[in-house]
Amino acid sequence: MQCPHCGSEEHFYHETSRENVPEIADQGLLPLSYGQSFVGEMGEMLSPDMFDEEELEDIPKEDFIQRTYYMTKEPQSLKYGEVLLRFPASAVKHRGYDVDPYTTDTIPPDLMEIKVQDRWLPIRSVS
């Protein structure tokens, strides 16, 4: 089943944990991560609240802008979460890149699909 808004257009992909799916199905994919200065040694996403003022002074201002990271190709295996989401590339109006591509846009839930047993389903149908 294809996203009714997607047609055969290009998709972007986002990994997340299962526990985030109901919220994404309700609110969409929100830009909640920060830039690469806030990625820990094990790949975990950190928050500015975890740093002291002196450490924060050395972080580039653009890393404080909240964003959602995505992939331009479907991954063969998951690295950052237990579920894979996709959305049409046209849903991303503001694009950026540091180590990976990201957007500051919220992706509406009506455009989101989740991969379940090798099939793409509307995210709202499984949450």
Image (cartoon, rainbow, N blue to C red):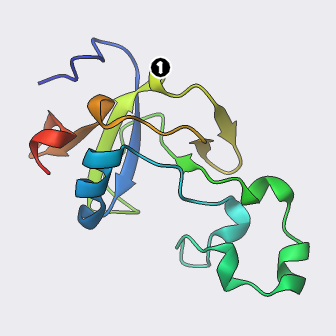
- The image quadrant of residue 9 is top left
Is residue 9 in view from this perspective? yes
Q: Amino acid at mark 1?
A: Ser
Q: Taking 64 as reference, is 4 above or below it?
A: above
Judging from the image, what secondary structure is the residue with disc 1 in?
A: helix
Outermost residue toward the front in this view = 27
Q: Nearer the viewer, residue 26 or 5?
A: 26
Q: Taking 47 as reference, is 125 above or below it?
A: above
- The image quadrant of residue 12 is top left
Percent x, y for residue 81? 34, 63
Q: Nearer the viewer, residue 76 or 112?
A: 112
Residue that carries the numbered disc 1 in the rendered image: 90
Residue at left 22%, top 23%? 3
Percent x, y for residue 101? 60, 41
Q: Is residue 32 left or right of residue 8?
A: right
Residue at left 22%, top 42%? 114
Q: Taking 59 as reference, is 70 above or below it?
A: above
Residue at left 48%, top 39%? 106
- Packing grade of label 1 (10 A; few <14, some 14-19, many >=20) is few
Percent x, y for residue 6? 30, 17
Q: Quadrant of the N terminus?
A: top left
Q: Is residue 4 left or right of residue 58?
A: left
Percent x, y for residue 96? 68, 38
Residue at left 79%, top 87%? 52
